[in-house]
Amino acid sequence: MVTSLVDAPRGDRGASAFWLLHPLVYDYPTRSDPLGSFRWTPERMEQLEHAVRKRKRVSLRRRGNEYVVVASAITTSRGREALSGYLAMTGEELLFVLADLDHFQVIDS
């Protein structure tokens, strides 16, 4: 195992050198369930589809970050179902793979 830049091969002294010295800094928690912490039931998919049709706001949590977006489309990304939504304040379009979500809720307004 390489523990310092001196021990690292010359090609590994670039941007990856930080990760060699600090391997625990960029450590996401691992999941035992590949589908996330909840299941996408038909009722939840119906809620999501209704939110897209009515352009409702949706609260999502992915990797510990919470987002509130206006649902705009259900699409696929690399063969996986995804929700496309935009931030109401900036208009920035974001794509959320459904299998990566930890939480989902349609906000009634």
Image: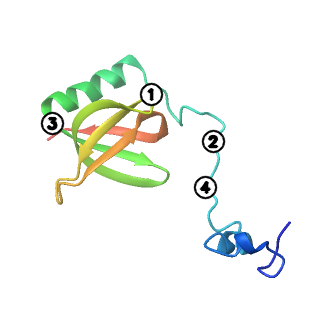
Residue 5 is situated, as x and y percent measured from the top left of the image, at 76, 80
Is residue 60 shown left or right of residue 34? left
**For marks 1 and 4 on the same chain, the one whose residue lies earlier in the sequence:** 4
Residue 29 is situated, as x and y percent measured from the top left of the image, at 63, 52
Judging depth in this view, the residue of 91 and 61 nearest the camera is 91
Q: CA distance from mark 2 to mark 4?
A: 9 Å
The amino acid sitting under disc 4 is Tyr
Cβ atoms at labels 2 and 3 below 8 Å apart: no
Q: CA distance from mark 4 to mark 3?
A: 32 Å
The amino acid sitting under disc 1 is Gly
Q: Which residue is the site of mark 1?
A: 79
**Label at residue 31:** 2
**For marks 4 and 3 on the same chain, the one whose residue lies earlier in the sequence:** 4
Is residue 38 shown left or right of residue 61? right
The correct choice, above or below, for 8 with respect to 100 in the image is below
**For marks 2 and 3 on the same chain, the one whose residue lies earlier in the sequence:** 2
Q: Which residue is the site of mark 3?
A: 55
**Label at residue 28:** 4
The amino acid sitting under disc 3 is Arg
Residue 92 is situated, as x and y percent measured from the top left of the image, at 23, 54
Which residue occupies 60% across, 72% down?
15
Cβ atoms at labels 4 and 3 below 8 Å apart: no
The correct choice, above or below, for 91 with respect to 60 in the image is below
